[in-house]
Image (cartoon, grey):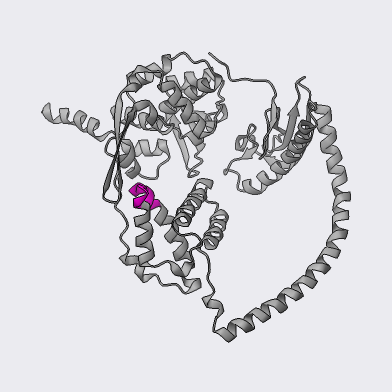
Amino acid sequence: MFGTKSGPKYFASSYHVTTFGMFYKVKGISKKTGLGVVNVVFRDDEGKETLKSTGVQVKPAHFNTKTGKISPKDPLFPEKNVKIQAIASEFEKALRDLERAEITPTATMVGSIVSFNAAVAPLAQEMVLTGLKEGHAYIASLEKQLAAAKAEVARIEANVGITALEKPILFQDKLEAYKEVLKRERKTEGTIKNYTVAGNALTKFRPNVHMKDISLTFLQDFQNHLIDRNILNNTIREIFVKVLAVYKYYAFELDLPITFLTKFKIVPPRQDENKIILEDNEIKEIEDLEIKTKGQYRTRECFLFCMETGLRYSDILSAEKKNIITDKEGNKFLSFATQKYSKQVEIPLTRKALEILERNKYQFSRPQESQYNQALQAMAKKCPAFQVEITKTGYSGDKVLVTRMPKWKALTSHLARKKFTDNALDKDVTLMALAEYLGHTNTNTLQKHYANKKRHAKKEAYKLLGE
């Protein structure tokens, strides 16, 4: 068995610096207000620390000391998170510079570099401002030239009968603008990413498509293109929801027609009736499997905990001691706001869930989801129970797409959530209560995607046969 603790480590990538020696503390907590100040801390291999205050005040219950993020429970969380990240970036830059120089960072070195950079920043800014004055004068000159060029272009367009309204506007440009609207509305990163996916699908069909090109024929051709690529109906529907949302949002501004949208027939939603449900003997084999890597051990612990609680993969880091509450009867619940919908949930913790938490010291390590699923499949591949062949049925337009594979290939993080639901229904937990635990606003999703309907129908049949 492997533990979850490790000493301070640091490494650089081309995108960001991950610093396991870096963490956060809330210091100077006021007894009157309950607020403390967030500090960024670096601890070196010898256990020595250097820290810098962010000036951000927060309630400790609203702050994650591992990620450095303030939860949405704090009404000013976006602005405060930006300030915290600014100070954290100073530490990351110092560590990156030392890494490039192949110097092992110490608390003293990191603290000195951060202080030095803070001291020289005003001087650098003054030098930049001097250069900016000259730059602004040059830009003003260029703007005059640009204005003259635009006037000449307008004159030529007028001569050949082109008006401003007739200039082509790319769908992709409006898609990017719409994503900015979604960001201002504080939509989740996942939602915004889905719009990017829809835009990429449209670009593959027809690069540089203009807003005015979208018509009934265009939509029908685009849908046929997706069907030819064997894209599943539910994915096609999701793509069109996003594409049409962008088109409708700008239709009035661009004087685009919308009546043709009522004539467009989108493919029907069709679900795979071959639901994949984990069986108890399969789970037992996963639990008993001898694990040789820390990554697989941590993945298994997360997976087992999610089966006991119904947590999404994205919420596993919320399984912390500070989020556990106890009712009058002594029952414990995991209380937090979900990442996907920011919905507050209170999930009952079973004896097994508490055991998993305790042996992991109330701290899970979460790899990237693709790595997580790969680790799950690698473990299941070694288990005899997962060698059984399963059938997955998909629908693309009117086509039926049948895929057969060993069950281990279908193992993903989401199956833990489905197993939790199946176990709860076996224990006669109501759909309404389950929807609350899982963070759904209603029971429709549960009935569509989660429940093993055939098995539960068979169970209910015995009630009739017993009469």
| Residue 410 shown left or right of residue 31 in the figure | left
**Which residue is rendered at x = 27% and y = 47% of the image?**
399
User: In the displayed image of the protein, which residue is found farthest to the bottom?
Assistant: 159
Residue 431 x/y as whole percent = 32, 37
Q: Is residue 427 visible?
A: no
Residue 16, above or below 162: above
Residue 49 x/y as whole percent = 78, 26
Nearer to the camera, 6 or 194: 194
Residue 390, above or below 55: above
| Residue 155 shown left or right of residue 299 in the figure | right
| Residue 23 shown left or right of residue 404 in the figure | right
Chief secondary structure of the magenta portion: helix
**Residue 93 covered by magenta stretch:** no
Nearer to the camera, 460 or 154: 154
Query: Residue 366's quadrant in the figure?
Result: top right
Residue 440 x/y as whole percent = 40, 42
**Residue 228 covered by magenta stretch:** yes
- Image quadrant occupied by the C terminus: top left
Residue 323, above or below 5: below
**Which residue is rendered at x = 76% and y = 24% of the image?**
44
Nearer to the camera, 125 or 199: 199
Residue 340 x/y as whole percent = 48, 43
Q: Is residue 134 visible?
A: yes
> Which residues are the magenta region?
227-238
Q: How many marks?
A: 0
